[in-house]
Amino acid sequence: MTPIVNRWPVAVLGATGAVGQAFIRLLDAHPWFDLTEVAASERSAGKSYREATKWLEGTMPAQVAALTVKTCSPEEVTAPIIFSALDSGVAGEVEAAFARAGRMVLSNAKNYRMEPDVPLVIPEVNGDHLGILDIQRANRGWTGGIVTNANCATTVMAAALAPLHQRFTVTKVFATTMQAVSGAGYPGVPSLDILGNVIPYINDEEPKIETELVKLLGTFDGNALRHAEIVTSAHANRVPVEHGHTVCMSVAFAEKPTPARALETMRSWTGQEAVRGLPSAPEPSLIVRDEADRPQPRRDVNRGRGMATTVGRVREDHLFDLRLVAMSHNVVRGAAGGSILNAELLAHTGQLARYLAP
Ligand code: NAP
């Protein structure tokens, strides 16, 4: 592991929301990053973070509680590394303004994910896609840049399918999701809509799954990101689970593996080399369970400090080739933790030092 000489000051935009709070929990005592600024909407700006935030889990770190919430402008927020947990309604303009102003933005919003020169990254799966940043900066004349992480349900799917795609080439995926309420942010879905219920619709979710998966499982050839040739059909459902998106998948392959070969492939998978040993990287990042009734969000969501993906029920499929179930923490692996791991990889590869040199 490359020794990190400097610590980096970082800011969180959208710091008061569900994902923003996860950033604050995960950045507390981070070995490389110091959280120095928090920002949110005009409603929160000017208040102390303690006053502006309805804190959802555990104890608010004291040094963050005392920070004054800023507005999301690069004139006010000065940190070189910007973690964005902004609502997509505002993320587009705000994130571009920070990238233009020379900051490295790690975004959770959908706005830039599918842009051809913007990396959409799960480090273990496609960390090498960060190479497109040089092209992004040249194309757009930005001195900073934008790196995105995927929709939280797509993250579950890509993490589980990456080893299988590498070896057997996935061609079709039929997916049904069971997505936790925390995926809708805070206050999110009204309790009378979700308690004792299943909602068979999540706005804009199915198109995100169907497009983002092929980018995540695609390749970077040094000039462009090439999408994988996979046809995906997704059914997205909201279920009364607090954290953890579960996805049931039927998968077709160019070369059909037996369940035993698929299991062996997933068990032995270690992901991209550069990620191993990074502070937020789980070991292993993919956990394969043999029990007939796993994964379960209640029992498996916090594995690898919320960064691991748990897979089970790998078996023959009557429609395609194999069926399986995968699950991970939507707010940690699927959002804040994923962004932090992206930033750690940029630090480790020297890209942060190269791009953010004064
Ligand atoms: P949330 O709980 O609703 O939080 C939204 C945040 O955006 C709040 O901090 C809010 O600040 C801020 N905000 C809203 N309007 C703003 C404005 N006009 N200017 C500046 N800040 C503004 O949502 P969330 O679940 O944390 O999601 C944040 C982002 O992450 C979204 O783009 C979402 O799609 C994405 N995401 C979420 C998950 C998940 O599991 N929740 C997973 C992956 C990706 P105020 O408190 O001041 O209003």
Image: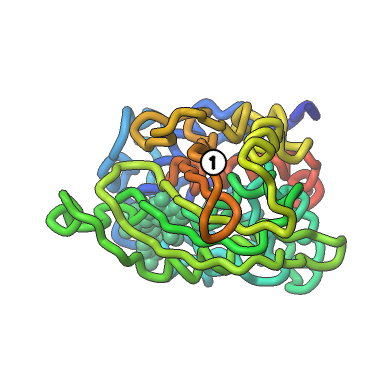
Which is nearer the eye, 26 or 44? 26
Q: Does 10 sit above or below residue 113?
A: above
| Residue 14 shows up from this direction | no
Residue matched to label 1 = 314
Q: Quadrant of residue 48?
A: top left
Residue 156 image point, x, y percent: 52, 48
Residue 109 image point, x, y percent: 50, 61
Q: Is residue 176 left or right of residue 27?
A: left
Q: Is residue 198 left or right of residue 67?
A: left
Residue 126 image point, x, y percent: 71, 50
Q: Give the residue at the far front of this rendering.
A: 318
Q: Quadrant of residue 25?
A: top left
Some atom of ligand 1 lies within 8 Å of the CB belonging to the residue at label 1:
no
> Ligand 1 quadrant?
bottom left
Q: Residue at point 71% right, 39% down?
A: 271
| Residue 224 shows up from this direction | yes
Q: Residue at point 48% right, 59% down?
A: 175
Which is nearer the eye, 257 or 215? 257
Q: Does 233 sit above or below residue 187?
A: below
Q: Is residue 347 left or right of residue 74?
A: right
Q: Residue at point 69% right, 38% down?
A: 261
Which is nearer the eye, 266 or 154? 266
Q: How is the image coloured?
A: rainbow
Q: Does 149 sit above or below residue 34?
A: below
The amino acid marked with disc number 1 is Val
Q: Give the residue at the far right of this rendering.
A: 222
Residue 76 image point, x, y percent: 51, 57
Q: Residue at point 60% right, 54% down?
A: 321
Quadrant where the image shows the N terminus: top right
Instruction: Classify mark 1: helix, strand or loop.
Output: strand
Count of numbered badges drawn on the protein: 1
For disc 1, the neighbor class at 10 Å (few under 14, some 14 to 19, many from 20) is many
